[in-house]
Image (tube, coloured by chain):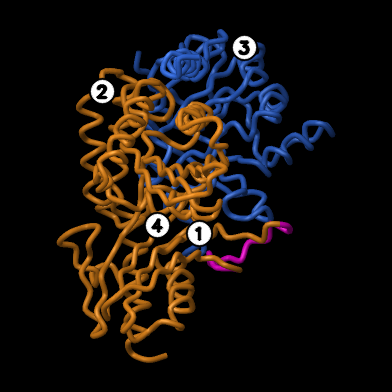
Chain colours: A orange, B blue
Amino acid sequence: MSGIGENLEKLCVALIRLAVTRLPPDVESALRDAWRRETSETARRQFEAMFKAIEVSGRELIPICQDTGLMTFHVKVGKDYPLRLELPEILRKAVSRATLEVPLRPNAVDPISRKNTGDNTGRLVPWLDLELVEGDSLELTVVPKGFGSEMMARLRCVPAAEGFEAVKRFIISSVLEAGGKPCPPIVLGVGMGGVAETAMRLAKRAIARPVRERHPEERISELEEELLEAINETGIGAMGLGGRTTALDVHVEYAHTHTVGTPVALVFQCWCARRASAIIEPDGSAVCTSHPGVDLWRFT
Amino acid sequence: MEVHLKTPLKEDEVRSLRVGDTVYLSGVVVTARDRAHRRLVELAESGRRPPVDLNGLAIYHCGPLAVEEDGGWRIVSAGPTTSMRMEPLESSVIETFGVRMIVGKGGMGDRTSEALKDFGAVYCSLTGGVGSLVASSIRKVVDVHWLDLGVPEAMWVLEVEELGPMIVSMDSHGGNLYKDVLSEASRRVREFLGA
């Protein structure tokens, strides 16, 4: 492989290691704020255990959660970035290497035989969400997706005749149904509109947005605030043991859709809302955007 | 109340625990998740014993991240997994093998709750996702059985020191914290939705 390909593979391994061992500062500070606001002693204990795990992982560079998930990548590739067709293979190799080197728990299995591939890769694993953009750089985000929360993902095509209130009902009742299972406080990703696949893809992009970054459109950011308040009103709390914070944030992304109805997709992200992003230039230099100031080469 | 317990656990010890108590556990915990539970129940049904005597021990719903090095095993990260998947099988495991504590996350259902009452055991919640914290309380990998099920599904016999904090969320008197939280949440959601 070319030098630039090898360089990129190393950077991907570093991003994966960073993602599973250190939470982005926006997530950690949202958890700390939730802990400060918390009045339930049981919930406070949950936050304190989280902070201890974060501390142990930061010190020893080991995964915070043993479910290091299935690797998913959000990739924005500049039209003049030198590697395009080679990207999926480079990312696959990086995941396989990271499994050994970090290490990660081997989670990828065949859906019928349940046979484990052993290195977290397989047919369409890792999963890539690719966008072609202007410029010559590559913007890469890795989201290791644990399955305690992923098992709670939902899709419902809501008929227009039921009104927008039905969309809200679907969202709130799904959070209630999930209870403590997705390891709250969660980040809830909501994708609305398009065809079914659009909605799910938008929900996935929504959980990759930094916590407490609002949607640029006011009506959407107001909807995010309204849903967040309603979810926290449930009192489900940290780990479902009762408390004031059930969600750290709600992120909504939307697309126009068909006159008949609206596909609505929900993706739950656990409190351990892992992600790591970098902008990589054609010369191999990289800036970590999810964890400002982190030198990625220290994580290779 | 905060209590520090050691295995083997005695019936009166666990019967004195109530929902909301904080527990730190030292001694031996044995991991078992979906497939190990199925195998335990097969053994129970055919009157055979598991490779480790579970009497007075804690079963931990966990699929660890473990690596083999220098001829031994090291547990890298080992947080709890969702307990509800084991609901159809747990009561039989508690009844047959004398398990006194179940450790997991998310809580369990009525069948397990009945078994906790009938046979004297508790369910403790460990914070989900804190795999590195749990790993730091593991003193020794005593043994591993059933590796044919794969590393996460195998039965790991672990010596732990001050594993916790854990919250007693289902006790031997019918108390279930998750149920209380969810029924209050349902009431509030109905209010919000105006239904």
Tell me the amino acid under the disc marked 4: Val
Residue placed most toward the observer, B69 or A179: A179
Residue ID for mark 3? B117
User: For the residue labelled by badge 4, is the local secondary structure a helix, a strand or a loop?
Assistant: strand
Q: Nearer the viewer, mark 2 or mark 1?
A: 2
Crowding near pointer 4: few (<14 within 10 Å), some, many (20+)?
Answer: many
Q: Nearer the viewer, mark 1 or mark 3?
A: 3
* Picture quadrant where residue A10 is located: bottom left
Residue ID for mark 2? A38
Q: Chain of mark 4?
A: A
Residue ID for mark 1? B72
User: For the residue labelled by badge 3, is the local secondary structure a helix, a strand or a loop?
Assistant: helix
Tell me the amino acid under the disc marked 2: Glu
Which residue extends farthest front? Answer: A259
The reply to whether callout 1 and callout 4 are in contact (CB within 8 Å) is no
Between the residue at mark 2 and the residue at mark 1, the CA separation in whole angstroms equals 42 Å
Q: Main secondary structure of the magenta part?
A: loop
Measuring 80% from the left and 35% from the top, which residue is drawn there? B48
Q: Nearer the viewer, mark 1 or mark 4?
A: 4
Between the residue at mark 4 and the residue at mark 2, the CA separation in whole angstroms equals 28 Å
Crowding near pointer 1: few (<14 within 10 Å), some, many (20+)?
Answer: few
**Range of the magenta residues?**
A112-122
Q: Is residue B134 visible?
A: no
Q: Is residue B69 visible?
A: yes
